Amino acid sequence: MLRPVTAGVDGSPESLSAATWAAKEALLRNVPLHIVHAWEWAPHPTVAVPVETGQRDWAHQILREAVDHVRALHPDLSIVDQQVSLPPVRALHDASEQSALLVLGTRGISGFAGYLVGSVALHVIARAECPVALVRAGHQDTKGGGSAASPREVVVGIDFDRPCDEVVAFAFEEARLRGADLHLIHAYSAPSLHAVGTGQRSGRELQAEREKTLVAAARQLHDRYPDLTVTATASQGRPAPRLLRAAKEAELLVLGRRRRDSRFGHTGPVTHAAMHHAPCPVAVVPYD
């Protein structure tokens, strides 16, 4: 059975944007869309619950509005909706175990200046079993957009110090589905003058070596995607600023997260920066 694309909704504009983006992703993959809303009865509900509406009815209304919104846009898409009586983090983590991709919403700060990533999203991303995509409120997917002078790209950050096969494979498939180019980016620290003076590789030699390794990583999958245009860039500098610059013209930024046995999980500083500041959707792919 094909795993669905799952969107978590909570009644916010950002979660509605996530459901809309997830619907397009489900259509690209030719799989069902699973829309989940987690709700637990509370003795003292938040002010978001209307006084004249019961908590259970309010929860059902949130789910129904999301489903109706997506169905109006994509009437032929198979949609499964689910109300879950669990804490949101637990419910979304459980959903990730059965999903090909989990999509969550996040709120933009001052346009492209950054994301406001809620605690639920942060905890889910750090612990999910499948890739998780963050979509900001109001984001408009431009699948197949761009011009000949400025083609759309899927950008993926590569870290040679950690395995990245799952991350690269996910990025290749996303680029293929979207008809976009793929841009592999690796950033590294420049060697010190002392290191060069003691016979270690110069900056130019190190860059050539890193680019060669990057191309080799891409070549392993490129044979499966012969029609895909792939660019590999290795450059000195901090990874986060380099990736954020590339993300300005990207349809999707793909990063990796190592699975850990930690109760709270961990995303790493580069992924954390991208989640908060990338102007395009960000997909975080777990790997062993």
Image (tube, grey):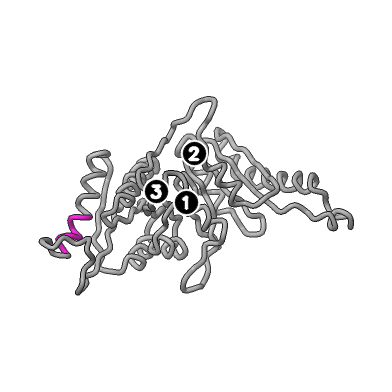
Neighbours of disc 3 within 10 Å: few (<14), some (14-19), many (20+): many
Question: Magenta span has 136?
Answer: no
Q: Earlier in the sequence, mark 2 or mark 3?
A: 3
Is 61 in the magenta? yes
Inspect the image, locate mark 3, and give the three-letter code of the amino acid beneath it.
Arg
Q: Nearer the viewer, residue 141 or 258?
A: 141
Compared to residue 192, the image places residue 76 above or below, namely above
Is disc 3 in contact with disc 1, using a CB cutoff of under 8 Å? no
Q: Residue at x 45, y 39 (%)?
A: 177
Judging from the image, what secondary structure is the residue with disc 2 in? Answer: helix
Q: Is residue 91 left or right of residue 40?
A: right
Alpha carbon separation for disc pair 1 and 2:
15 Å
For the stretch drawn in magenta, what is the main secondary structure? helix
Q: Position of residue 114 (x, y in %)?
A: 46, 50
Q: Residue 82: x, y in percent?
A: 25, 58
Q: Hey, what amino acid is under mark 2?
A: Arg
Q: Secondary structure at mark 3?
A: strand
Answer with mark 1 or mark 2, whichever residue precedes in sequence.
Answer: 2
Residue at 56% over, 49% down: 168
Q: Amino acid at mark 1?
A: Ala
The residue pinned by badge 1 equals: 283
Residue that appears at 38% across and 63% down = 120
In the image, residue 201 sits, relative to residue 176, either above or below, namely below
Question: Which residue matches tag 3?
Answer: 136
Label 1 secondary element: strand
Instruction: Give the residues drawn in magenta, as a range.
Output: 56-62
The residue that appears at 79% across and 48% down in the rendered structure is 203
Q: Is residue 96 left or right of residue 147?
A: left
Residue 140 locus on image (x, y percent): 38, 39
Dot in front, 3 or 1: 3
Q: In this figure, which residue is indicated by the disc labeled 2?
A: 176
Residue 270 figure quarter: bottom right
